[in-house]
Amino acid sequence: MKKIGLTTTVPIEVLIAAGYMPVDLNNIFITSENYSKYIDAAERDGFPKSLCAWIKGIYGVCMEEDIKEIVGVIGGDCSNTKALVEVLKLKGIKVHPFSFPQNHTLEAVKNEIRQLMTLFDVTTEQAEKVRKRLSAGRQFAKEIDRLTYEENKVLGFENHLYQVSLSDFNGNIKSYELELKKAIDIIKERNPLCRKLRLGYIGVPPMTGDIYDFVERFDAHFVYNEVQREFAFPRGDKALDIFEQYYDYTYPYDIDFRIRELREQIKTREIDAVIHYTQAFCYRAIEDIVLKEHLDIPILNIEGDKLNTLDARTKLRLEAFLDMLLDLKESKA
Ligand code: SF4
């Protein structure tokens, strides 16, 4: 299958129906042992220092890994992608645009997905057939998520990884399904974790993957990964069709819709506090103000930049936050 790069989660059903294998450029960037080479490549080509590392990483991956064709999400996800795709076009990469509509109505979502279908010469029936094909993998991820917050058998990083990789099924649908299935069998045999604090991770997936390991050393357990879970479409099985599935997706639309889902998950998962990760130079950091106003729970906002490990100051802030939460919980008990 011909590969096609993605700047974020898009209706991959359409691309697969058109004979492509989608590859999430973010995943290539962040899982590389030498991830900083992609940022360096972007800065060498003129990308400013004061720009989000994910954007530079995506650009670097396109250049260094000889990506020829991508779907660039120019609406709803990230305003920086709009400028990024202009540079990619300049470099000879074929860019197919896709937008999550500003106006969050089913009709508007239908229009955008239909445009994508026309672009790739795919019918609704063909896309639906793929959607059914992908449902097994998505159900497995949902089960891993359930094992995380109901049975307390999955670590926060594992939960993050298994769900975030569903944006492109790790580049191979069949083998990723098998991997998820095997993981479930192993996880079910585990003893439950018994930690005092139940935490939620919200915001874009972290550059600093060590956050899970670091935080969970303090008698804490991440039982929710907000955006990663959205990438896995946990409510997709209830959607009547592909249009409803991408309508009922919180990440690219208005914040009120996102807050409704956050509130529900905080309640269902009995979450004590939330860590809100934002990326340096990202407009989403401003959303922290709104989230703190609307979520009635302790929230710590931390920011990552180019490093893929936590810096000393952030570790100190996390430690102080967790200490405070533990005291609070003990005093309540
Ligand atoms: S972190 Fe923010 S600025 Fe960076 S790619 Fe994501 S949405 Fe865009």
Image: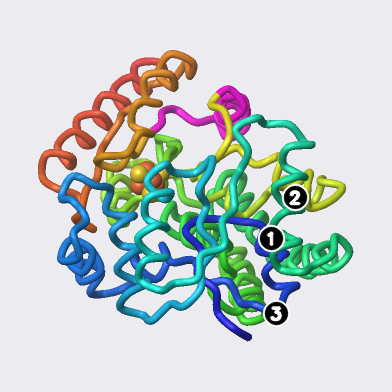
SS at mark 1?
helix
Residue at image position (70%, 63%) is 119
Question: Which residue is at the front of the view, 35 or 123?
Answer: 123
Placement of the N terminus among the 4 image quadrants = bottom right
Q: Exactly how many numbered labels are in the figure?
A: 3
- Indicate the amino acid at tag 3: Gly
Q: Name the residue under label 3.
A: 19
Mark nearer the N terminus (3 vs 1): 3
Range of residues picked out in magenta: 256-274
- Indicate the amino acid at tag 1: Arg
Q: Position of residue 31 (x, y in %)?
A: 35, 69
Q: Label 3 vs label 1: CA separation?
A: 20 Å
Q: Is residue 135 left or right of residue 147?
A: right
Q: In this view, does 297 lie to the left or right of 174?
A: left
Placement of the C terminus among the 4 image quadrants = top left
- The crowding category of the residue bearing disc 1, from other C-alpha atoms within 10 Å (few below 14, some 14 to 19, many at least 20), is many
Residue at image position (43%, 49%) is 82
Q: Which mark is residue 138?
A: 1
Rendered view: 275 above or below 126 = above
Whether the magenta-drawn stretch holds residue 268 is answered as yes
Is the residue at mark 1 in contact range of ligand 1, meaning its CB lies under 8 Å from it? no
For the question of whether residue 224 can be seen, the reply is no
